[in-house]
């Protein structure tokens, strides 16, 4: 174990979702999205860094019937804390224009909903042809704001999770399964 892992105050507790379960579910979401956009061009906007692993799995499941393009945004999140600040700031914007395009926001998790609500507002303001949002995880008990989710991988309890792109203080993103943390 690294010094950072040893000193961060948390450790891995138990597996909440296995890689197999995650793969199956993402495959189903990718098929559904491919059906929705058959023959169309779609820009999938990955919200860095947490959604990077989900995004890679999702777009590989789409197949050739969709003209899928990718773009990236980065927003400020929790830093090293495990509770939301409510402050959202764009650190990196899309490279391409959203105007007149089918846009799908790809996010790792909806917790309070503040981040997605903000991002949806920003992209909607750019006059896309359509806007949908897909999240790998949703914590319904934590939601503070109503925002539209078109596809949800899994609804999970109010626990802090890591793996499959999700981190705590930059750690554990690389784990194939999704784990709950517990105090060390
Ligand atoms: P929201 O604005 O409260 O919905 O927070 C969304 C962001 O918080 C996500 O993109 C994640 O970066 C982070 N987040 C919320 N819950 C978790 C968690 O359980 N594990 C890792 N990151 C989380």
Image (tube, rainbow, N blue to C red):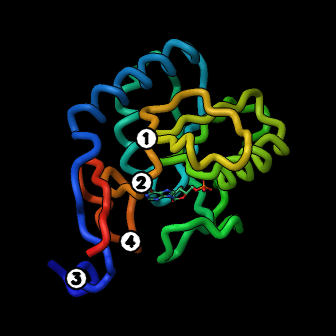
Residue position for label 2: 159
Q: Secondary structure at mark 3?
A: helix
Q: Position of residue 69 (x, y in %)?
A: 53, 37
* Quadrant location of the C terminus in the rendered image: bottom left
Q: CA distance from mark 3 to mark 4?
A: 14 Å
Residue position for label 4: 170
Number of other residues with Cα within 10 Å of mark 2, as a class: few under 14, some 14 to 19, many 20 or more: some
Q: Between disc 2 and disc 3, whose residue precedes?
A: 3
Q: CA distance from mark 4 to mark 1?
A: 21 Å
Q: Are marks 1 and 2 in contact (CB under 8 Å)?
A: yes
Q: Secondary structure at mark 1?
A: loop
Q: Between disc 1 and disc 3, whose residue precedes?
A: 3
Q: CA distance from mark 1 to mark 2?
A: 8 Å
32 with respect to 8 (left or right): right
Ligand 1: does it lie within 8 Å of the C-beta at label 4?
A: no
User: Residue 6 has which mark?
Assistant: 3
Residue position for label 1: 156
Q: Nearer the viewer, mark 4 or mark 2?
A: 2
Q: Between disc 3 and disc 4, whose residue precedes?
A: 3
Q: CA distance from mark 1 to mark 3?
A: 26 Å
84 with respect to 136 (left or right): right
* Quadrant location of the N terminus in the rendered image: bottom left
Ligand 1: does it lie within 8 Å of the C-beta at label 1?
A: yes
Q: Nearer the viewer, mark 3 or mark 4?
A: 3
Q: How many marks?
A: 4
Q: Which residue occupies 30% across, 35% down?
A: 22
Q: Is residue 163 visible?
A: yes
Q: Nearer the viewer, mark 2 or mark 3?
A: 2
Ligand 1: does it lie within 8 Å of the C-beta at label 2?
A: yes
Q: Position of residue 57 (x, y in %)?
A: 35, 38
């Amino acid at each position: 174990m690294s010094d950072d892992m040893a000193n961060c105050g948390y450790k891995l507790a138990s597996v909440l979702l296995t890689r197999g379960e995650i793969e199956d579910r993402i495959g189903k979401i990718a098929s559904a999205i491919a059906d929705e956009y058959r023959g169309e061009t779609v820009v999938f906007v990955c919200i860095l860094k947490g959604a990077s692993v989900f995004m890679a799995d999702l777009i590989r499941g789409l197949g050739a019937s969709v003209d899928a393009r990718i773009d990236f945004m980065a927003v400020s999140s929790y830093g090293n804390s495990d509770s939301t600040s409510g402050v959202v700031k764009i650190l990196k914007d899309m490279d391409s224009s959203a105007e007149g395009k089918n846009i799908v926001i790809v996010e790792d998790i909806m917790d309070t909903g503040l981040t997605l609500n903000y991002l949806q507002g920003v992209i909607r303001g750019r006059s896309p042809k359509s806007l949908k949002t897909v999240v790998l995880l949703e914590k319904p008990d934590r939601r503070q704001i109503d925002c539209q989710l078109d596809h949800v991988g899994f609804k999970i309890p109010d626990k802090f999770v890591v793996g499959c792109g999700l981190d705590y203080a930059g750690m554990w993103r690389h784990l194939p399964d999704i784990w709950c943390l517990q105090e060390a």
